[in-house]
Image (spheres, grey):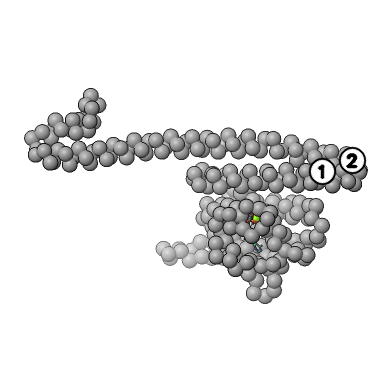
Amino acid sequence: LRDDTKHTVAEAIGFTTYSNSLPTVLTYAAIFDVIWKQIELYEQLQVHDRMQKEFINVAAHELRTPIQPIINVSDFVKSRIKDHELREFLDILNRNAKRLKKLSEDILDVAKIESNSLTLIKENFTFKEIIPDMIRDYQNSTDNRDIKITYGILDTLVVYGDQSRISQVISNLISNSIKFSSDVVSISIKAENKVINMPNASSKEMVVIKVRDAGVGIDKDIFQKLFTKFNTNSYQGMGLGLYISKKIVEAHDGDLWAENNKDGAGATFSFSLPI
Ligand SMILES: Nc1ncnc2c1ncn2[C@@H]1O[C@H](COP(=O)(O)OP(=O)(O)OP(=O)(O)O)[C@@H](O)[C@H]1O
Ligand SMILES: [Mg+2]
């Protein structure tokens, strides 16, 4: 259709439609002009999208690279010295470097989600491969409170998903439960099977993971926009954890929801995954 030797669209198609009336030629010209402009715009957007994805990947690498040695070296030096005060300084260094790492990872995850470039590497795994180690890390953290976490998920339960992304979801939920508890930190992690009836009369088997705490419960103003970005009432965090977690679970065809406990203090966050 396109004659690139002509200067304008009207010229390019005018010749072939010359026998028609002038208004018809102009109408065709206008329509083709709009279509070509849309195509050009679409091509520009694709280039922009590719550049944004490349930027995200480079930025992810560049941000993470200098933070990891700070964490490793502070861990190493701490294991070598006995002085109590110096060990506390190293803890401060280590804690803040880890916070910075988490913040940069969260910001990059949001960028990935919003540019549709969050990719999942799926495999079969069991929760015993991820949760017990995670619990140990939280219990050995420098938090002065007594952190009690009970875990009751069958070792034989196999899930097909991105192990590291699902770990990220569970870790976000545990860290919230710890953060939004006062003196007593008591968390239980359980799983139950659920069969969901689909609109086409078939049924789908899901596993529902429940993280229940005995903390302060979800504030009612926060609850209204619980899974939106930057919705936080904490001075420690940006309000990205639940937004990212929900997107990760949805990318696995599951869902994430929350309720305040009716029988006792605290909140329960649950997420489903197909099995
Ligand atoms: N277990 C919980 N108990 C009570 N409130 C919670 C709990 N988990 C989340 N919330 C509420 O939901 C808000 C959003 O949680 P989210 O994890 O997205 O952000 P954050 O923890 O404040 O910051 P970030 O996760 O970015 O470090 C929290 O600020 C808090 O008000
Ligand atoms: Mg959080």
Residue 243 horizontal/vertical position (percent): 57, 55
* Of marks 2 and 1, the one in the foreground: 1
Distance of label 2 from label 1 (alpha carbons): 10 Å
Identified by mark 1, the residue type is Leu
Residue at mark 2: 81
Question: Dots 2 and 1: beta carbons under 8 Å?
Answer: yes
Left or right placement of residue 187 versus residue 107 in this view: right
Identified by mark 2, the residue type is Ile
> Residue at position x 8%, y 35% from top?
19
Residue 106 horizontal/vertical position (percent): 61, 47
Does dot 2 land on a helix, a strand or a loop?
loop
> Residue at position x 65%, y 46% from top?
103
> Residue at position x 71%, y 59% from top?
179
Q: Residues within 10 Å of mark 2 (few under 14, many from 20)?
A: few
89 shown above or below 155 = above
Pick the quarter of the image with the C terminus: bottom right
Does dot 1 land on a helix, a strand or a loop?
helix
Number of residue marks: 2
Residue at mark 1: 90
Residue extending farthest bottom: 263
Image-quadrant location for residue 158: bottom right
Q: Nearer the viewer, residue 265 or 160?
A: 265
